[in-house]
Image: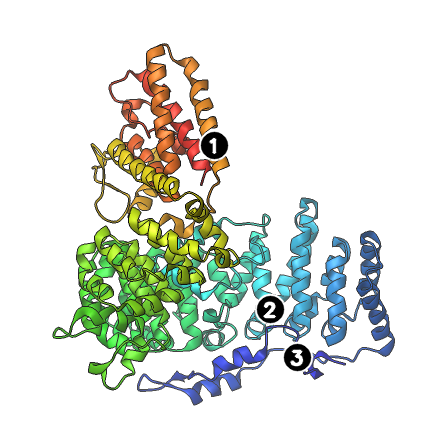
Amino acid sequence: MGGKDKSHKRDKRKKGNFDDTSKKKVSGKAADGSFKTENFAKHRMNYAPHQSVVRKQVDPETTKYFSEIANLFESNGVDLEERAVICGNALEETRGNEFQLATDYIISHTLQMLLEGCDIDHLCDFLRSCAKDFPFIATDQSGSHVAETAIRSLAMHLQDSDVYSVVEDTLTMICKVVVENSVDVMCNCYGSHVLRSLLSLCKGVPLDSSKSHDKKSSVVLAERLNFKASRSDENASLHAHQGFPDLFKLLVSGIMNCTQEDIKTLQFDQYSSCTKRVGIFSPSQTALKLLAGDDEELLRIIPILLGCKKENIKDGNIIEANEVRNIVDLMKETAFSHQMEVILEVAPEVLYNEIFLKVFRNSLFELSSHHCGNFVVQALISHARHREQMELIWEELGPNFKGIIEMGRPGVIASVIAASQRFHTHEQKCCQALAAAVCSANESPRWIVPRILFLDNYFCCEDKANWTWQGSAKIHVVGSLILQEVFRYPGEFIQPFVTSILSMEDDNVLDLAKNTGGARVIEAFLSSSVSAKLKRRLIAKLRGHFGELSMHLPGSFTVDKCFATSNISLQEAIVSELSAVRSELSKTKQGPHLIRKLDVDGFAARPDQWRSKQESKQSAYKEFHATFGSGEIKSSKHGNFLAHTSKEKPRPEGIKKMRKEINDSLASPVPFLSNSGFKGRSHKSGKHWKNDARTAVDGDGSKGKNNWSKKRENQGFEVLGGILRELEPSCLKGVFLLACKSLLAREDEIGFDAEEECAFAIGRAAALDPQGKDDRMREIESARAAKTLDQAFIIL
């Protein structure tokens, strides 16, 4: 009846998931610096749990008792209060037999229901009673689920602050036992999950937080390549309860207070450094992530994980020269490479700099060539701290773009390009090196984009000179991401790529737009800083196929982007094609939104009125340029709707953070809508907004002393409101950011309070530039402008 005798798997945490990883080459270090599989296998064979326990079989009477309880709960014939009583009574029957029951495959399921339904007293009694056996329960296939359920139940009860002390006493007993057996728990495929949950509970973060649990590789990649803002800061402040800081330190210290032999086990073991790239963090990685920002503690434990001598840590010379080669070789191992990625993410700057200069310098190309080491290089580049480090990275990797791509490591190239954009250095050189890597100087640049899109297919082709577009081949994911990054460079740097994408055949462009990765490349080109004329040349290649494209989910986004980038005549052609398939389009997932946003119904019913509305929008854009495009802030011919060219003045220390956010947002090439939840707006909402805006203006008008000024101001606000209502959300965001920047530049002149908590409200008030007015009128006009903008931003 034991859980280990059952062949049926209980959930997705199958042992095979980890065994597949162990088939990769892992090893110990040989004399020549290489790693031998048999050496590491021998090391693992020598490792065994420090303790073992014999599991007794559950008697038939007890089995029958818990079976009846399970049937009772499954019948749904028990109310909530009665269920809690039954759960408490049943848990009392487990006293002294917790290990046997928790590790029984059948009864463990019932035990999980009891732990979820009981009160806090019975839950803590159960955990205290089985505390001495908790490591053995946690490392059992069935028992691990019972242990995790108990931890989740404790977290739920902690929503009541009155139970904090009793939970703390219980966790103290559990943590002390776990610390004594930390290596056994960490190196077990089941126990590692339990230990991660226990760390999260003690830290006070939600157990399902991305900080301690799975994080999609696509999210990690998006953050590394600047496509998605990192949420690490947000997660750092995410707390479900106040946590148990002393117990958290106890657990972390216990994990790290290992012998040198145990550290080697943690470095190599597939469970203690589990497969992060499939979405699982090991306990040591979880501890590192939960310690992010605690530089003192990180400076203590990271060198231990690197295998550095403890006496060197005290002296400040953390990494000795004779340890460098060993660390480089370790990064070629699957388990340690995952751990090193997390170390580079959370390492304090002083430690990151030492690791960069001592370990990675002069080894970047070697590691980039390795199937595991290249992921560590990507993490290193993505978390580079300043431009000087980027200079060293470029020195080693810049001349080797072609070799790195040929070896099948395009992720390294993508990371270098993203870092060059982040630090605004080597941008043109990156474009030139990338183009040269896929297209020789004597070849036409028309093949650059297709070859990057089909990296694997091209570089696996024996006759590369005669390679042609492979419509049936799969678009390379990283190749698509690289092109999306490239089109975020300034237009003067990417001319070969522009020439290439515009040289593509119409059918190839259509195939590209139907593919998710290809569609994103087209959208990136349409969002780039190249001229509108060149963008319309690409859009024209899709003419006659917009209806077909809109029926595909990826293609619908491309149609939307094409419409936003087109002139009136092209917009009319796009909507006309959509109108022809309107009934079929409305049945798709994306159809209703696209029909509403492009006003396809309005075009079908009243084409002239629709055309007039689009012309009014164009006029609104021009009026916006005329209003806000003079002086320090002026419109840009290319790329973003607005470009700021003013020189910043020194400003008070109190609003540095606000100023930095504004500058970063204005400098970021990521489109505003890429991370927004915008769902459009109805005519009704716009109507309410207009009335509210007028009300807001009229309400503040009572403070003014000059009726003529009041009338003029009200007219001005209505004009501004009319312009803002016609703008897309991304433009509204631009207005907001520029308004903030404008006010910050004139803060001393206006005389507003510079405290950080009111910076946003003050910033909104600067949308109208009330020059030539006295201080009182400036304050009135700024306040009214703020309310007008407030209403406009509600549309977002």
| Residue type, mark 3 in image | Ser
Residue at image position (46%, 35%) is 686
Q: Which mark is residue 180?
A: 2
At label 1, counting other C-alpha atoms closer than 10 Å, the crowd grade (few under 14, some 14-19, many 20 or more) is few
Looking at marks 2 and 3 on the same chain, the residue that comes earlier in the sequence is marked by: 3
The quarter holding residue 114 reads: bottom right
Residue 762 in the image: state x and y as whole percent.
37, 29
Measured in 3D between alpha carbons, the distance from the residue under mark 1 to the one under mark 3, in whole angstroms, is 73 Å
- The answer to whether mark 2 and mark 3 are in CB contact below 8 A is no
Q: Is residue 718 above or below residue 229?
A: above
Q: Which residue lies under the disc numbered 1?
A: 687
Secondary element under disc 3, as helix, strand or loop, is loop
Is residue 179 rendered to the left or right of residue 262?
right
Secondary element under disc 1, as helix, strand or loop, is helix
Query: Which image quarter holds the N terminus?
Result: bottom right
Which label sits in the foreground, 1 or 3? 1
Looking at marks 1 and 3 on the same chain, the residue that comes earlier in the sequence is marked by: 3
Viewer-proximal residue, 383 or 134? 383
Q: Is residue 779 above or below residue 122?
A: above
Q: Which residue lies under the disc numbered 3?
A: 52
